[in-house]
């Protein structure tokens, strides 16, 4: 009897030890899971607070104004192009806009965001879009493609006839500009992010500047634009003047001036400079740690206006580490050999071969050859 009881007690003690060890493990796991949840909650609330600083404007009906400020970039002393050439271009645009023309391409693995830089200085009014870059994140090819859209392209603006593409923003804000890009180039534009160019200065300064190789001619215009900016905002006129050419670490004022030069290489040279600066920004952001990214977001997010919902922004921020490994590629529309220079209503415009540029965008952005 005693031997049996002794055996029974020993068995119970072993089970109690096993149960006790199991409970301890469960408690440890529970505490660890609780800590993870608390950390995630704090991170969510923190990012939610940051995202709340963005000027979010949900997409609604496109509101189009009747008239806009006259274009300040008209030519004088030059006649319009021959009527036959203008009519031929307008007919090409009309055919490209027909309902039965090329379908608008969409791919759930490609996220297209239109970056809009504008020189809007009057609150509540939309100025012409000074810079338009379509940033495409392709999750299948692991590429980020920055496509500059030339501001002088002569296109159809829904509801307003035919004009330079940069007028779309002045007539109907980002929504009309998105629609104009979609209809003319048959590519789905998912979202937009708009920033006044002067907020761009703070971003570059927060990044510690961008390193760019500048020529003597570019230095001259950078210094001129920086001086004009200083006078406009009340800074010392000689602040941030470059002393010479070569590889320079440009601060915010200098980078903005560099991005806006049109006198060298006209608008083609200007968009190339903008893509260089954008690539430098991308490279700088990749190297930032959490604390530095926090400072950057606190500085820049309040300057943005966008229709990206908070949930999408939250997802994009969390995806930055994986996106930083993507290959960065550049594109310009219209491409070389796919346009001609014309003068229409005293404005220098680009007459675009739409089909060639549509095919090129599909190939580069979607890895989609039109012959497939």
Image: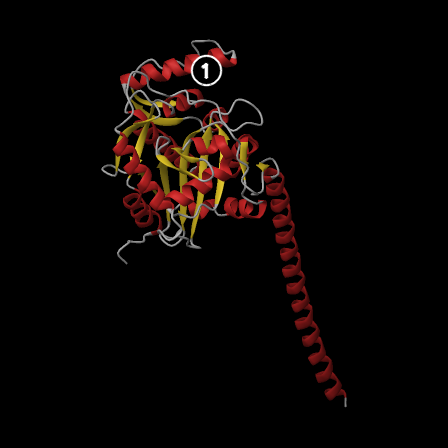
View extreme (top): residue: 237
Q: Is residue 114 left or right of residue 4?
A: left
Quadrant where the C terminus sits is bottom left
Q: Is residue 212 left or right of residue 321?
A: left
x and y percent of residue 132 in the render? 41, 34
**How many numbered circles does the render carry?**
1
Nearest to the observer: residue 216 or residue 117 = 117
Nearest to the observer: residue 17 or residue 255 = 255
Task: Determine which quarter of the picture holds residue 229.
Answer: top left
Residue at the image point whose x is 65% and y is 50% from the top: 38
Q: What's the colour scheme?
A: secondary structure
For residue 64, above or below residue 138: above
x and y percent of residue 322 in the render? 44, 48
For residue 298, above or below residue 258: below
Tag 1, which secondary structure?
Answer: helix
Residue at the image point whose x is 50% and y is 39% from the top: 175
- The answer to whether one can see residue 289 in this image is no
Residue topped by disc 1? 229
Nearest to the observer: residue 175 or residue 146 = 175
For residue 366, above or below residue 294: below
Nearest to the observer: residue 121 or residue 86 = 86
Q: Is residue 59 left or right of residue 334?
A: right
Task: Determine which quarter of the picture holds residue 89.
Answer: top left
Residue at the image point whose x is 25% and y is 29% from the top: 82
View extreme (left): residue: 337
């Amino acid at each position: 009897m005693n031997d049996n009881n002794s055996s029974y007690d020993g068995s119970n003690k072993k089970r109690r030890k096993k149960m006790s060890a199991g409970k301890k493990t469960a408690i440890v796991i529970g505490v660890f899971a609780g800590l993870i949840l608390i950390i995630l909650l704090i991170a969510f609330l923190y990012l939610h607070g940051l995202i709340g600083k963005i000027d979010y404007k949900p997409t609604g009906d496109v509101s189009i104004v009747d008239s806009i400020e006259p274009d300040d970039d008209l030519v004088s002393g030059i006649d319009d192009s021959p009527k036959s050439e203008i009519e031929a271009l307008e007919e090409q645009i009309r055919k490209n806009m027909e309902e039965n023309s090329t379908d608008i391409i969409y791919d759930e693995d490609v996220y297209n965001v239109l970056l809009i830089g504008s020189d809007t200085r009057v609150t509540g009014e939309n100025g012409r879009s000074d810079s338009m870059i379509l940033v495409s994140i392709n999750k299948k090819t692991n590429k980020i493609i920055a496509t500059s859209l030339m501001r002088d392209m002569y296109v159809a603006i829904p509801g307003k006839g035919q004009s330079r593409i940069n007028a779309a923003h002045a007539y109907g804000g980002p929504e009309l500009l998105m629609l104009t890009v979609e209809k003319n180039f048959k590519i789905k534009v998912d979202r937009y992010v708009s920033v006044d160019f002067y907020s761009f200065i703070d971003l570059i300064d927060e990044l510690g500047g961008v390193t760019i190789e500048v020529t003597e001619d570019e230095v001259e215009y950078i210094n001129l634009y920086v001086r004009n900016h200083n006078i406009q905002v009340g800074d010392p006129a000689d602040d941030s003047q470059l002393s010479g050419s070569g590889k320079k670490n440009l601060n915010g004022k200098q980078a903005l001036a560099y991005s806006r030069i049109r006198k060298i290489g006209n608008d083609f040279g200007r968009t190339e400079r903008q893509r260089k600066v954008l690539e430098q920004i991308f490279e700088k952001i990749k190297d930032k740690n959490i604390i530095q990214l926090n400072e950057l977001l606190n500085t820049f997010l309040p300057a943005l206006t966008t229709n990206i919902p908070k949930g999408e922004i939250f997802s994009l921020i969390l995806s930055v580490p994986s996106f930083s490994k993507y290959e960065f590629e550049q594109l310009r529309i219209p491409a070389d050999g796919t346009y001609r220079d014309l003068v229409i209503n005293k404005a220098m415009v680009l007459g675009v071969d739409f089909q060639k540029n549509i095919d090129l965008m599909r190939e580069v952005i979607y890895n989609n050859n039109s012959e497939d």
